[in-house]
Image (spheres, rainbow, N blue to C red):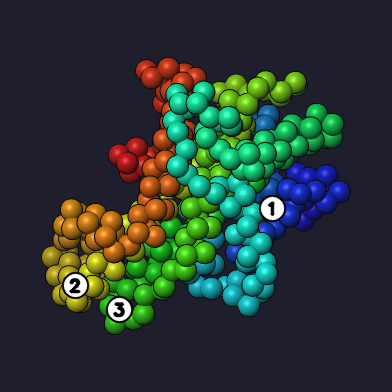
Amino acid sequence: MEDESYPHTYIPEDLILESILAGLGTNIYTDITSPNLVIDQHGKAFHKTNLLYASGTDLEENEMRRNDAMIERIGESMYLGLGYGFITLEEDILRLMILESMGGGYNEPKLSQERNYRYPLGLSSRHFSTLQGRLLASDALLRNTSQKQLIILPIVRALSAYAGGFGEALFRSSNQWHTDPTSSLHSLSQSSLSSAEFSILSAARLIVLNFILPSRKGIMTSRYNHLSLMIPAILHSAFHLRSGILQYARILLAESEGSILDKAIKLTNENKDDSTPLRDLGQVQNTVNLGHFIASRCIHLKHVLETCDYAASLILQIISKLDGPRDAKVKVRDDCRAW
């Protein structure tokens, strides 16, 4: 199927998307870039002639469903290693470098403290230039070509889905461990954790900078442009990544205590159901102990958890700043809202 969202000329955004999505499933590039893809409530995908003007289509809800579908596919690909052997080490490094250029570092100040820094969000000149350059290039292409969507939108979709998909892969790995506690738990490399961390943070930064950069001629930067409709999807991905990290940490904690088998048997006996989701395993563990374990033994996981919290706070702060505290509402699902 011909890519209907991009001009025929190869542009930097193509390289960014290809690098992020390399080895993560067939047709995923097309499904992320298509401006007219619709995912119904049953997860079935189809195309409309012009989604922006289609009646009965909730664009925000559709972006959430698309994000959920991409998370499932990317998570499965990561867990099963479907892309292993199809991408080179150099391509994997390139993905990490591209993600770092947009999401490196997270110790920035709150929006209210921006005036004390040269660049918004306390960004370095390098990171700010990268993000600003992508937004301005998207603006220019929308004005000067027959684009049907902001060129930055598929990139934000890919970043969000990649981070959430990594969390999904951790769920699948942990579920396998729950089913067979004698099996090997997938090990996490620092590069894979960093890629997920950079992905969710760069998605949040692009959303925020789209609001706070000086007004760009001919581009609507108000609260409800199409890019801002990605906000619920990004928050869901941050929650999914955070939940996957926590679940993986619970298994590490149980393994370190030498009691994972006893806990799994106890949980199965209590529920009389071998299909009990592993998310419920945390009910038989002490949350305080888990937090202490992560803080003292899993600093690499702690860093990703903090990044998820920070990315979500960036988005919520800018919405509150634009809409006011009373009107700053985001349509997210109950589990994400509780977080």
SS category of the residue bearing label 2: loop
Q: Is residue 227 left or right of residue 296?
A: right
Q: Residue at x 41, y 35 (%)?
A: 313
Name the residue beneath numbered marker 2. 257
> Closer to the camera, 139 or 44?
139
Q: Residue at x 68, y 69 (%)?
A: 90
Q: Please report whichever mark, 1 or 2, sits nearer to the chain's N-terminal start.
A: 1
Q: Is residue 139 left or right of residue 307?
A: right
> What x and y, as percent, mark residue 167?
43, 57
Front of the two marks 1 and 3: 1
Which residue type does callout 3 highlight?
Asp
**Residue 276 at least partly seen:** no
Q: Please report whichever mark, 3 or 2, sits nearer to the chain's N-terminal start.
A: 3
Q: Is residue 306 left or right of residue 117?
A: left
Q: Residue at x 37, y 51 (%)?
A: 305
SS category of the residue bearing label 1: helix
> What x and y, as percent, mark residue 83?
60, 71
Name the residue beneath numbered marker 3. 180
Q: Please report whichever mark, 1 or 3, sits nearer to the chain's N-terminal start.
A: 1
Name the residue beneath numbered marker 1. 16
SS category of the residue bearing label 3: loop
What's the distance in space between the residues labelled 1 and 2, CA to CA? 42 Å
What's the distance in space between the residues labelled 1 and 3, CA to CA? 38 Å
What's the distance in space between the residues labelled 3 and 2, CA to CA? 17 Å
